[in-house]
Image (cartoon, rainbow, N blue to C red):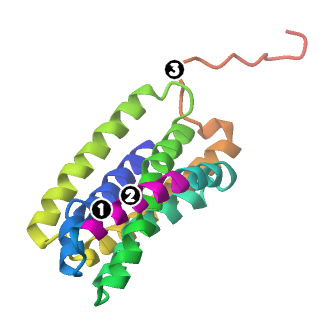
Amino acid sequence: MKNLTLAATLLAVLAAYTVYSFLSLVAERAGLDGTTYAWLLAAFGVAGIVGVRVASVGLDRRPNLAPATVVVAATTLPLLTLVPGALPTAAAIPLWGAPMAALPVVLQGTLVRLTGPGGDLASGAYVVAYQVGIAAGTWLGGVVGGERAWTAALLGLATVPVVLVASRSGARAEQDPGLRPASGRSAPARSRSSGS
């Protein structure tokens, strides 16, 4: 479960940063001037605040659905920038801010839920996976052209099954204590008889 979540983190961040690292080029290609782009970035940040709040509530209420939803949104919303004209890109940038800000929240939240107590090492591995995803996504965007949002969409869709499998595995582990990851503490021994 932990490895699946880390793999999903790496793939999702790689996919998103394939486009995010080159967002100014996307805006320029759509014909947006610098002032408009600056305001859109401000809206991107405001949407991110909302996205974190909504994702946090969603992760508590629907822990299996929320991560997949955020991953899909974070990696497919940039497809709007492929529609000709400035308006679709101008709409996509602030909308994209919500799932982009929520992405680390749901990914790390899922990892913590799946690893249980004593997951400090897993949290450290998550940070590494996220940073590698940023670096790899930036590199890939430079190779294939970061303004080509279809690359992020394809990678993101490939991430969804990994997220779903990890979440469902975690749900089964929560229902069956015997499947929960070890926390580093030994479980209390059960008595062999009712009188012991």
Q: Going from the N terminus, do you reach mark 3 or mark 1 first?
A: 1
Q: Secondary structure at mark 1?
A: helix
Residue under label 1: 38
* CA distance for labels 3 and 1: 49 Å
Is the magenta region chiefly helix, strand or loop?
A: helix
Query: x%, y% of residue 78?
Result: 34, 73
Q: Secondary structure at mark 2?
A: helix
| Highlighted magenta segment, given as a residue range | 35-51
Residue under label 2: 42
Residue 17 sits above or below residue 3 on the image: below
Left or right side of 137 for 111 = right
* CA distance for labels 2 and 1: 6 Å
Residue under label 3: 184
Q: Amino acid at mark 2?
A: Ala
Residue sitting at the far front: 35
Residue 2 sits above or below residue 52 on the image: above
Q: Secondary structure at mark 3?
A: loop
* Among the 4 quarters of the image, the one containing residue 126: top left
In the rendered structure, are the residues bearing label 2 and label 1 in contact, judged by CB atoms less than 8 Å apart? yes
Magenta span contains residue 46 = yes
